[in-house]
Amino acid sequence: MSTLITGIGSLVTNDPGIGAGPLGLVEDAAVVVDGDRIAWVGPAAAAPAADESFDAAGRALLPGFVDSHSHLVFAGDRTAEFNARMSGQSYSAGGIRTTVAATRAASDAELDANLARFLREALRQGTTTVECKSGYGLTVEDEARALRIAAGHTPETTYLGAHVVAPEFADDPAGYVELVTGEMLDACAPHAKWVDVFCERGAFDGDQARAVLTAGAARGLVPRVHANQLSYGPGVQLAVELGAASADHCTHLTDEDVAALAGSDTVATLLPGAEFSTRAAYPNARRLLDAGAAVALSTDCNPGSSFTSSMAFCIAVAVREMGMTPDEAVHAATATGARALRRTDVGTVTVGARADLLLLDAPSHVHLAYRPGVPLTAAVWRNGVREV
Amino acid sequence: MSTLITGIGSLVTNDPGIGAGPLGLVEDAAVVVDGDRIAWVGPAAAAPAADESFDAAGRALLPGFVDSHSHLVFAGDRTAEFNARMSGQSYSAGGIRTTVAATRAASDAELDANLARFLREALRQGTTTVECKSGYGLTVEDEARALRIAAGHTPETTYLGAHVVAPEFADDPAGYVELVTGEMLDACAPHAKWVDVFCERGAFDGDQARAVLTAGAARGLVPRVHANQLSYGPGVQLAVELGAASADHCTHLTDEDVAALAGSDTVATLLPGAEFSTRAAYPNARRLLDAGAAVALSTDCNPGSSFTSSMAFCIAVAVREMGMTPDEAVHAATATGARALRRTDVGTVTVGARADLLLLDAPSHVHLAYRPGVPLTAAVWRNGVREV
């Protein structure tokens, strides 16, 4: 079954060989979807016939968003903690540990339903690929369970046993790293594609992070790193040294960190929702882009520090606060997000790519920044199937 | 026909006599809607019977948003201008005049359809009351037309002939003020409830603004003022002196301006979408609230400086950037918005109030700030009718 999507006012292909600029923009375009793939892309006037036809009515079509950093296997929420923080009140917050307790106490079915609900919410907002981390279990069984559940929904599963030191190991962080690199890794590796670590004061230092990532790599998991979020540190350099697909957050970077990213294949994934929701200073995307680094945008969706699932919101904030142009932000939320997951089948609208498409209720992708907060989804296809 | 909405996890009544705090929060609540009005509010366990029943399933219910400042009678958009501004490129922008030209060239039917589309978009996001200004016509006929069209959709119509000096009067601003206070006012007053003026360098000075507002008041229109947006100036003091319902923007305020607002019935209406979309510094809501001024939030929805129709987005940004607590921001977007329109029938969930209600897909109103950018509308009633 093939479908001709025609009357596309503005098409973001992310292929400069097809259209104008880095976004490969084509005006008055058409796309043919055949099965789960893109079969044809070009000017509407030259489009071939197909079994069915869909009139985009002048609206903008772009690749579905690729959200390469989220924490969606959890239970409970942290409304009271957020409310206290934003109201200037003190709150004896357990932080991540609050969510760890709620997640451990939840049934498999509950966690699965929560995850499905958030993925559906993201899909309604145009996100067709979602990376999903463990990290709220922190026991062998609970981490493996989180990844098993995540793997039922997405191939982009990330083992983050090294999110924080488990409460049971508060006095023995070395023992926890041993668990994370040993028995827990054994239980998790079969369900994970990636290994991640929160390299930060209060979480894991450079040596511990290196141990976690190299152990994961030895099991075939590819590294990605929570790096330089709250302070300067070794995370980014470690990510580059170990060939990580992505260094995430990148809020506090030295010139050497920026140069290392620019000289590497490691994507700098920026997560503006986290700074928005914690009133922290934003990372400087402009500096990274000007140095030649690849910059992706992602939601960091989690109930503590960034409870947004909206890639459009991240685009709008990145343009407002991080020195990105609307074009750069849209590219970062699609093509570079795919690169951060080392995926070549998503993030572009090109022949052979997966038919993951977002039709906006707007004539241009610029509206994602120009109309902040406004739900602009007109239609979403994933694997060629109209989902929204 | 009466409807019992029960199972409300958290109800914002905005009546401290009914529930906890300034928001009058009631947990495990119910509301009875009878015709277009609220007939009963209280704990679910004590709810009376009704013809129909709706299960809120633990979600949060609040008054529909009251958006007291918008510019929605227009044609065209300004995507290229926005894109250039946010990309650091120069752009020979005609600014407001670009939209004036497009609006004048549009047919009545086109303007009416545009307005209806934006009001529907706002309704889907929980906004049940919208104020709507003229100001993109700037001729007698075009201003009157804008207000006639707006009056077909909302009682909250505002005559803003004094938006900028019409291009035809570029060399004769005094002549334009004469028109605005004379023939144009005659044509517009029958269709307007409010009179407004953009009191700012480059638009109208204090004397001109006073002439516009007093002429409007003499025709029964109540003043509201675009005041102190881009620079310090006389707008706020003038608004207070003339008993304006609202002084809007309030971005640059002296201590005397803050004191004047705090000692008056004039609401300070803050419009964070404008600062977001122009990378300008935000107004300080905390300073106004601490002084005792009433603060409302509104979208300023317009195609130039703030093309958002999302009150939820404004709440999230106000909490992030303007020192408001989530509770204060929700109050500002509902009860104080109603006050800025001198309405007592909207902005609260109390017996006798209009049944304008927003059910969130979330357990608490705090999620409007906690989940930025995420569409959270589960249902919307306006005048007792389920619209979304």
Image (tube, coloured by chain):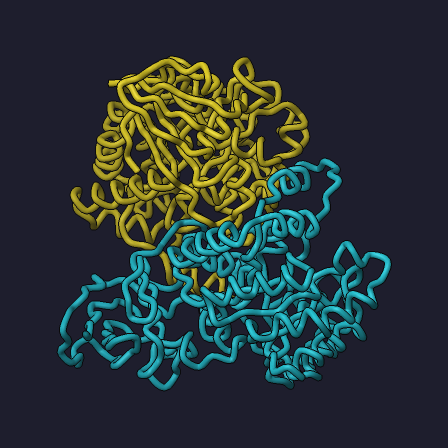
Chain colours: A yellow, B cyan
User: Residue at 48% across / 26% down in the picture?
Assistant: A11
Closer-to-camera residue (A313/A250): A313
User: Residue at 63% across / 79% down in the picture?
Assistant: B244
Left or right of A43? Residue B164 is: right
Where residue B357 sits, quadrant-wise, is bottom left
> Is residue A89 in view?
no
> Is residue A334 in view?
yes
Closer-to-camera residue (A75/A388): A388
- From this view, report whether residue B269 is shown above or below residue B83: below
- From this view, report whether residue A57 is shown above or below residue B285: above
Relative image position of residue A2 (x, y in whole percent): 28, 18
Quadrant location, the N terminus of chain B? bottom left
User: Residue at 56% across / 77% down in the picture?
Assistant: B294
- From this view, report whether residue A212 is shown above or below residue B264: above
Relative image position of residue B200 (x, y in whole percent): 76, 64
Relative image position of residue B192 (x, y in whole percent): 56, 73
User: Residue at 76% across / 60% down in the picture?
Assistant: B165
Quadrant location, the C terminus of chain B? bottom left
